[in-house]
Image (tube, helix red, strand yellow):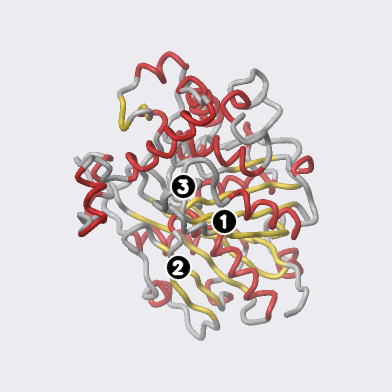
Amino acid sequence: MTTTETAVAGLGITRLGKVYGRTATQFAAEAVRLAAEDAGISLGDLDGLIVSGGVTNAVGLDLQGVLGLTDLRLLTAMQGYGSTAGQMVQYATMAVRSGMAETIAVVWADDPLRENGRSSAAYAAAGTAPAGFAGLRASNGISSTNTLYALAARRHMKRYGTTQDQLGHIAVAQRDWAVLNPLAQFRSPLTLEEYHASRYIAEPFHLFDCCLVSNGGAALIVTTLDRARAMRQPPVRVLGWGQSHPGATGIRNDEFGLVTGAAASGPRALAMADTSLDEIGVVELYDCYTYTALVTLEDYGFCEKGEGGSFVSEPGVLGPTGRLKVNTGGGQLSSYYLWGMTPLTEAVMQTRGQAGERQVADHDRVLVSGNGGVLDHHSTLVIGTD
């Protein structure tokens, strides 16, 4: 393998949210076209394509034909749930560095929302009733992602004294960022009182502890740094990465809810990037729930284990005026929900210096997380300016 440096050279994002009448494949195709246009290249310049499409794998290898791509040197579909976006960039980077391909599009898209349907039912069709021993969990009411993450959050609260009020500070801070983001679905300010007044989804989670559901797609173009420099946009260098798949959920005496894969993948990514947390100017976390953002901050080392609650509720830490710039677009809680593409797309915009009102001055090094399953899979990326 060569030491060829790589970069993200193009970014494409479709309309997001309650966008109906289009399939996930159509969203994906548009996102790739937009990313290529953003980079200033034609679709024919692509020689690699990595696709993913939600929990139902709604986007497949037939996207190649939809886009009219020929003679690809790399074509694959991936599924790592919320860690997929980060993993796709990692594998695209390795393919470019090895010489397997030169210019690769990575794309994620999904269409779970249905017109006149409830957001809560968006992923219901993807689930099946567990059989055998696993059915014991469902028979006790633990039958959805919401309830499983609620268990994780409750365990953290019981072990470390984390409170609901502390989780609320994350929701409020991210909404403050979303107010500045024209792509965000929620752009009205949120108060802590409004957070507490919202209905319960699965205790301890209120409505605003839980992520949005969105239709749409996003794509990136990964290529060599030299090629990226000759393209239209400022190159976003891929500096370091790591994965962690604990594989211990449901095992007796494991660390479920207390420690995530970020604790292992974060240090690996930072070491590869030859950087440290004090050089990270922007942090884009996978925030399917407020709790997920909190425990990930702990596991990356921004605060000590068990102190995440007091850390996020300390004045002057989070939000646009805080010293730690976390989920600067509003995250999945307030902006849009494209799995791991949500933090990744915002990270690219910040690194380019193209985030408008919410642009962070110190954006030379950006840390991006992806979390998949119920704390089962984790990806970390460190990206930076040229």
Of residues 378 and 255, which is closer to you in this image? 255
- Are there few (<14), some (14-19), or many (20+) residues within 10 Å of tag 1? many
| Relative vertical location of residue 7 with respect to residue 42 in this rendering, above or below | above
Query: Regarding mark 3 in the picture, which secondary structure is present there?
Result: loop
Give the number of the mark in front: 1 or 2: 1
| Relative vertical location of residue 372 with respect to residue 70 in this rendering, above or below | above
Q: Which mark is residue 78?
A: 2
> Which residue bears the numbered disc 1?
379
Residue drawn where x is 52% and y is 24% of the image = 161
Choose the circle earlier in sequence order: 1 or 2.
2
Specify the farthest residue to the top.
193
Residue drawn where x is 56% and y is 52% of the image = 261
Query: Regarding mark 1 in the picture, which secondary structure is present there?
Result: strand
Mark-to-mark CA distance, 1 and 3 = 24 Å
- Are there few (<14), some (14-19), or many (20+) residues within 10 Å of tag 3? few
- Are there few (<14), some (14-19), or many (20+) residues within 10 Å of tag 2? some
Q: Which mark is residue 253?
A: 3
Give the number of the mark in front: 3 or 2: 3
What's under tag 2, amino acid-wise? Met
Mark-to-mark CA distance, 3 and 2 = 31 Å
Mark-to-mark CA distance, 1 and 2 = 13 Å
